[in-house]
Image (cartoon, grey):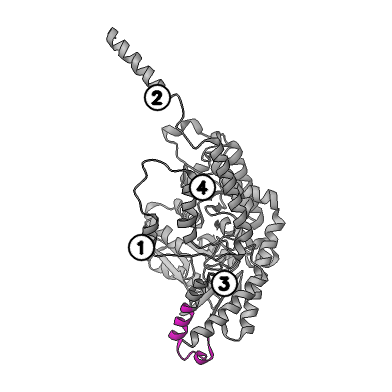
């Protein structure tokens, strides 16, 4: 190297060192400390005030564009200003699924312990895809999965993985189920579904490249439960047509009405016809903690795979689902890969790389909030949560029946009650479309009050209002308030 080149290289070395001597700037420690204190205080105020607050607000796209549209800022602003805008222009325009009178869809109601676990997870930034980088977090996830298996009576040799939610869990389960089929068999494979299935199963099938004709919906009874006899009939028909019966997806707590399919009988059918049995228990799995639910879920322990969703009825923050696979080796057999850039993290025989068990390589320490919650609150707290929600649903149904102006369309299943408002002038089914329009207007008017939020669905062709109870905050007074409010709003709308 010429002397001039050496001098130039040395100067560049000095310049590079000087340019990277300090980390990039952040808000100073005192500002951050004050901000953390403000966020903590705000969270605690919200925790105490939520039952008396509005269930939330919504806005049009145009309104939100007016509030938030701006070019990406070239320079930062004080964090206190940004947080103020978040409160005024973002958080204000959202519904609160954790509100004690938010009974729409299947909501969430995380405890502050789970929130704290989520905060610790984000703050620690552990990479939970490989054992080498996260032995402690991986062991916690294994422990949480073992606890879930114990709750459900699932075999100890089963394996599992935490996912982003039930949709990802359903996809993982079906991909594992398909892995044992040859490519020729995959072209002929048929999956049997309840007509009350969750839409994520159809989406999983689409992602997997299944044709629409490979999905075979089967009928349900008046309670929304899969008809066992329909399985044998469908298998016989498909075999005659040269198709390959492959898998069955059953519900353990349907989103529409909380229906639990006859799992034990379906497991026997699947065994007889060599079908993979996947149970979508995203909502209903927690019921296994109490005697009534354990009886309803009898047979779930025979499933080949199960989807769970702790951020539904297990008081966790959003972003954590779970899939369990009976034959534990099938998960890594399906997903494990060893690219060159991962050669340093090959696990020992008794270690687990959770990246080998699912779709994601980069994984959060989602098990932390579940582990923390169970350690702090105990299983008994969750057992009482389930029993409380069953009682709240029973109370709601009884009050609706006694009000005299509501029709129960589906009696309480798990913690869901489906009903509709029927004024005297529309009783007897003389004008079903008018009853539907009235109940749609009733739900919309209820949301406008800010006092509660219930969603609608269709059951046997009729519009139904759903009340789903999973919230540890909800009280008997909340139920009485909402039923009285619905009756009053219904009367007012009936005379419009």
The boundaries of the magenta stretch are 421-441
Mark 1 and mark 4 in contact? Answer it, CB < 8 Å.
Answer: no
Of callouts 1 and 4, the N-terminal one: 1
Of callouts 1 and 3, the N-terminal one: 1
- Name above or below for residue 413 compared with residue 462: above
Question: To which residue does mark 1 refer?
Answer: 62
Q: Which is in the foreground here, disc 1 or disc 3?
A: 1
Describe residue 339's horizontal placement relative to residue 390 as left or right. left
The answer to whether residue 245 is visible is: no
Question: To which residue does mark 3 refer?
Answer: 467
Question: To which residue does mark 2 refer?
Answer: 19
Image quadrant holding the N terminus, namely top left
Mark 4 and mark 3 in contact? Answer it, CB < 8 Å.
Answer: no
Is residue 437 one of those drawn in magenta? yes
- Name above or below for residue 51 compared with residue 38: below
The answer to whether residue 279 is visible is: yes
Mark 2 and mark 1 in contact? Answer it, CB < 8 Å.
Answer: no
Of callouts 2 and 1, the N-terminal one: 2
Of callouts 4 and 3, the N-terminal one: 4
Determine the CA span between mark 3 and mark 2.
Answer: 60 Å
Question: To which residue does mark 4 refer?
Answer: 331
Determine the CA span between mark 2 and mark 1.
Answer: 44 Å
Tell me where residue 106 appears, x and y as whole percent: 54, 65
**SS for callout 4:** helix
Seen at 62% across and 83% down, the residue is 401
**SS for callout 3:** strand
Q: Which is in the foreground here, disc 3 or disc 2?
A: 2
Crowdedness of circle 4 by 10 Å Cα count: few (<14), some, many (20+)?
many
């Amino acid at each position: 190297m010429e002397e001039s080149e050496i001098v130039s290289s040395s100067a560049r070395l000095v310049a590079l060192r000087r340019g990277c001597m300090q980390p990039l700037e952040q808000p100073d420690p005192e500002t951050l400390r004050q901000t953390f204190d403000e966020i903590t205080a705000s969270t605690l105020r919200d925790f105490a005030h939520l039952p008396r607050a509005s269930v939330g607000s919504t806005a049009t796209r145009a309104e939100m564009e007016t509030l938030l549209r701006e070019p990406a800022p070239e320079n930062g602003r004080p964090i206190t200003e940004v947080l103020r805008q978040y409160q005024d222009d973002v958080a204000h325009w959202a519904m609160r699924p954790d509100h004690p009178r938010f009974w729409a869809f299947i909501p969430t109601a995380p405890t502050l312990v789970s929130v704290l676990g989520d905060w610790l997870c984000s703050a620690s930034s552990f990479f939970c895809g490989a054992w080498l980088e996260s032995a402690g977090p991986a062991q916690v996830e294994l422990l949480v999965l073992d606890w879930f298996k114990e709750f459900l009576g699932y075999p100890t040799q089963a394996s599992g993985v935490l996912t982003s939610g039930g949709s990802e869990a359903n996809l993982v389960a079906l991909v594992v189920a398909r892995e044992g089929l040859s490519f020729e068999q995959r072209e002929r494979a048929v999956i049997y579904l309840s007509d009350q299935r969750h839409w994520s199963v159809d989406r999983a099938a689409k992602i997997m490249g299944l044709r629409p004709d490979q999905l075979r919906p089967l009928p349900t009874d008046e309670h929304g439960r899969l008809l066992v006899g329909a399985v044998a009939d469908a298998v016989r028909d498909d075999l005659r047509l040269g198709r390959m019966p492959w898998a069955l997806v059953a519900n353990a707590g349907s989103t529409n009405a909380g229906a639990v399919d006859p799992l034990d009988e379906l497991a026997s059918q699947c065994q007889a016809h060599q079908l993979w049995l996947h149970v979508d228990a995203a909502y209903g799995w927690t019921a296994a903690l109490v005697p009534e639910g354990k009886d309803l879920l009898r047979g779930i322990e025979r499933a080949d795979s199960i989807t769970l969703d702790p951020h539904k009825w297990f008081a966790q923050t959003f972003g954590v689902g779970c899939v369990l696979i009976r034959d534990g080796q099938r998960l890594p057999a399906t997903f494990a890969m060893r690219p060159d850039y991962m050669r340093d993290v090959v696990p020992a025989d008794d270690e687990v790389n959770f990246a080998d068990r699912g779709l994601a390589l980069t994984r959060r320490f989602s098990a932390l909030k579940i582990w923390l919650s169970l350690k702090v609150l105990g299983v008994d707290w969750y057992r009482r949560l389930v029993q409380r929600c069953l009682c709240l649903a029973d109370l709601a149904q009884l009050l609706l029946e006694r009000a005299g102006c509501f029709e129960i369309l589906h009696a309480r299943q798990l913690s869901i009650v489906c009903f509709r408002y029927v004024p005297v002038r529309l009783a007897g089914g003389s004008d079903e479309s008018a009853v539907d329009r009235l109940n749609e207007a009733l739900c919309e008017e209820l949301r406008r009050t800010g006092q509660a939020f219930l969603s609608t669905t269709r059951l046997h062709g009729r519009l139904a209002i759903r009340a789903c109870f999973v919230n540890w905050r909800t009280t008997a007074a909340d139920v009485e308030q909402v039923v009285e409010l619905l009756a009053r709003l219904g009367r007012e709308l009936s005379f419009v």
